[in-house]
Image (tube, rainbow, N blue to C red):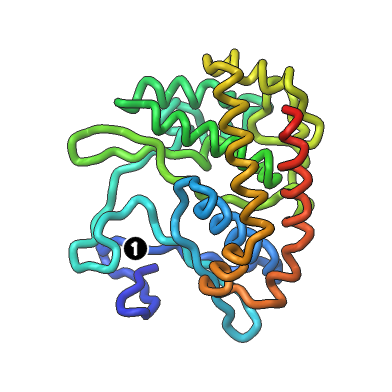
Amino acid sequence: MLIEEGEIKLPVGSTPSSHILKFAVDGRDLVILNELFLNTLARLAGLECPVTTAGEIEGHWYLLVERYDREGIGTPGLRRIHQEDFCQAMGYSRIDKYQVPSGPRFAHCIATARHACRPSAASILHLIRWQAFNVLVGNTDGHAKNLSLLQDDRGRWRVAPAYDLVGTLVLGYHPELAFTVGEQANSQQLLPRDWQAFARECRFSYALVRREIRALAQRVEALLASDDLPRTLMEAGMNERGWRRLQQQRHHIVKQCRRSETW
């Protein structure tokens, strides 16, 4: 979709789009509300994430996600930025986007970012926080095609902002994490040893991983208890009824944030 002067349009010819438009499939509007919620929560918590808004037409919810692989959104100079998802970057087929049965592990994504991104520190920290956020919110669909690399005009790579953040666990989809933590795929049964194994495999210090998890969990829990989050969601198109429908997701995240104190 292309948004110009507040109007949603279809791009013509080679004109780049500026936003991704998503509709609720088979009336599952809670998925739309959930993604708006988590994208907004992630961004407020400091995780780089596209601006996301929602709307309702004749009782049907839709989501508008600003494209992170564009430059000059809202200007006549709108243009594409080259990107590759991590399956492409690592030479995996799209059908191997999940770790099980034959896809990459999270440590392979970290190694790819270390090799491609110069400097790599910011991109690697983003990946740690992305995986920690997925664990906290129950996004079990955080697979290798939901991670991407962006290349600038000078050929430099960096990890793209987070996208497709959905609380699939609470919504009743995949119960197991797309990327395990150590060998643990159940996000509600994690122990320190799982994060220690995660850190070793990714060549991090456990102290770094623990510090990042706890800092993120504290920010997220504070936001869930504040007025800032619902106010920002209302500004992005949420309504009171939608906010009430998200309370199960909210309670799940609070429990996970408190569990994280023992990790």
**Residue 161 x/y as whole percent:** 44, 45
Of residues 191 and 11, which is closer to you in this image? 191
Question: How many C-alpha atoms fall within 10 Å of the one at disc 1: few (<14), some, or many (≥20)?
Answer: many
Q: Nearer the viewer, residue 222 or 19?
A: 222
Q: Is residue 1 at all visible to an observer of this figure?
A: yes
Residue 174 relative to residue 104: left or right: right
Residue farthest bottom in this picture: 58
Q: Could you say where residue 114 lies in the image, as x and y percent from the top left?
A: 40, 22
The residue positioned 74% from the left and 30% from the top of the image is 185
Q: Position of residue 249 (x, y in %)?
A: 74, 56
- Which quadrant of the view contains residue 98? top right
Along the line of sight, the residue nearer the viewer: 219 or 162: 219
Left or right of 235 on screen, residue 225: right
Q: Residue at x 36, y 76 (%)?
A: 9
Q: Residue placed at 72% from the left, 27% from the top?
A: 263
For this rendering, which residue is in front, 223 or 174?
223
Farthest right residue? 189
Residue 14 visible to an observer of this rendering: no
Q: Position of residue 204 (x, y in %)?
A: 53, 17
User: How many labels, in total?
Assistant: 1
Label 1 sits on residue: 17
Quadrant that contains the N terminus: bottom left
Residue 183 in the image: above or below residue 253: above
Tell me which amino acid carries mark 1.
Ser
- In the depicted structure, whether residue 165 falls above or below residue 76: above
What residue is rendered at 68% in x and 77% in y?
240
- Indicate the secondary structure of the residue bearing disc 1: loop
